[in-house]
Image (cartoon, coloured by chain):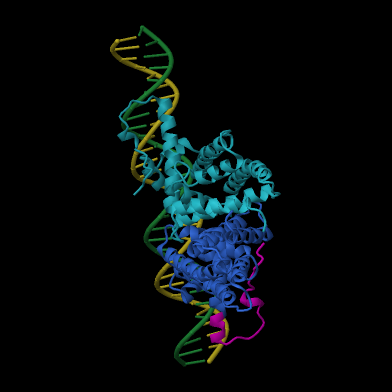
Chain colours: A blue, B cyan, C yellow, D green
Amino acid sequence: MNPNFQPDRHEIPVRMNQAENRRFRRQSLLRAAIATVARYDIQGATVERICAEAGASRGLIAHYFESKEELLLAALEDWFQSAIKIKRDIAKDKSLSAEQRIRQIAASNFTAPSYSWENAAAWQAFTNASRYNLAYADSIRSASRKVRRLLKPLFKRAARKHKLKIKAGFAASSLYVLIDGLWNSLATGKDDLKVGSARKVCDKFVDGWFVKNQ
Amino acid sequence: MNPNFQPDRHEIPVRMNQAENRRFRRQSLLRAAIATVARYDIQGATVERICAEAGASRGLIAHYFESKEELLLAALEDWFQSAIKIKRDIAKDKSLSAEQRIRQIAASNFTAPSYSWENAAAWQAFTNASRYNLAYADSIRSASRKVRRLLKPLFKRAARKHKLKIKAGFAASSLYVLIDGLWNSLATGKDDLKVGSARKVCDKFVDGWFVKNQ
DNA sequence: TATAAAATATTGGACGATCATCATAATTCT
DNA sequence: AGAATTATGATGATCGTCCAATATTTTATA
């Protein structure tokens, strides 16, 4: 049922002191929030369900977060931070050409740990909610900008190597819009798309930017 | 505030008989449902808000639909039916080449009446909800299949003209996934994308399919 | 055509269910 | 023992549905 199941504390045999316990509980709640949002959407992610997923009782959220809203926002930002880190690492990898880095960043969106059905589904839920929730909107806009800032110089350099003139910012944007579409499609299953195909679509799209005009 | 405002019955001076009135009320509720879902998401589209948007009282939904859920589903299917009709008409247009038809169908997603912020936002809300609502999932899967069935033969014919071998079904899928991503981006505004740019991204993507391999 | 009766349309209040938050109690750790 | 952590019941708010009442249109009748 739930591929990314987080065992609750009863299944953790190791003894933890309070500080460790606190970190563990917090992290459990963050992961449980993502998992629950993925399966039930934002409004379906009730305190009851999130806590059940985290193996805790209903009242615990209040002890670790100001409110349910604050937990969800923290979960979104926590997840995004780890997602951008993976991309930054690839962007800095000097053993790869700029074009290779672009392709690898794109591909990383369809490989664990960045990709999982849970992450795709939760991302879809949060972006959807960002239409009426200003906090999510801000967080997601900032996330989008960070990714574009990462990709733009790579597109610029890759184009120079190909002796092409392209609008690097536009290329970066559109690649990420495509990846978003692929994530949504994978999250809902509406187009019978497989993860492997998603990778191919990205590669084909990048091809398009580095081909000479006819 | 609401660009697609439907005037309520008090602003309609013409006398309507019961049959006309019934059609008008039903249609008002369907449009109001889309508009409200666009602005407030599915769970935020309360009976109160939908009816206010339609210029009716809270109880009226029960008179025209089995339940709120049934209204939302009817609104989704009603909207999709008009959207697919526009695409079918383009697909049948013999004055255009297959490739031109593909481009025009793609472009129609970014021109009124198929495109409006309201439609994009509501579509995003429904696809998002399709993860946990089976009725939406079925409806959307069927919609997706219809569009792919429309595009696939066009890609096949266009490729033949270009003397290329492509996977037409794959091309059709991926074009529609891209369009979905563009709609979501426009609905949320997260990537600062404009409608005009969305059209260009589509064109660039279609280019990619009809370019000789290097 | 006028009018009564029937059918249909519309309204808004009541009810029951769900949920986040809060207060308080119980438990565990230091 | 005292502090931190965890559990549970109570409370108030929100929402969909149902229902009784009121209003309007249509049909039947003379």
Which quadrant would the C terminus of chain B be assigned to in this image? bottom right
Name the residue at 62% across, 68% down.
A108
Side of A151 where A110 appears, left or right: right
Task: Give residue B208's quadrant in the image.
Answer: bottom right
The magenta stretch spans which residues?
A: A1-23
Q: Is A30 rendered above or below residue B43?
A: below
Residue at far right of view = B165
Q: Is B155 rendered above or below residue A112?
A: above
| In magenta stretch: residue A27 | no
Q: Is A62 rendered above or below residue B117?
A: below
Q: What is the total number of numbered labels drawn onto the structure image? A: 0
Camera-nearest residue between B9 and A89: A89
Instruction: Using the rendered image of the protein, determine whether residue B106 is visible from the camera's viewpoint.
Output: yes
Camera-nearest residue between D26 and A210: A210
Task: Give residue B23's quadrant in the image.
Answer: top left
Instruction: Using the rendered image of the protein, determine whether residue A68 is visible from the camera's viewpoint.
Output: no
| In magenta stretch: residue A3 | yes
Q: Main secondary structure of the magenta part?
A: loop
**Image spot of residue C13 (x, y percent):** 35, 45
Name the residue at 57% across, 60% down.
A209
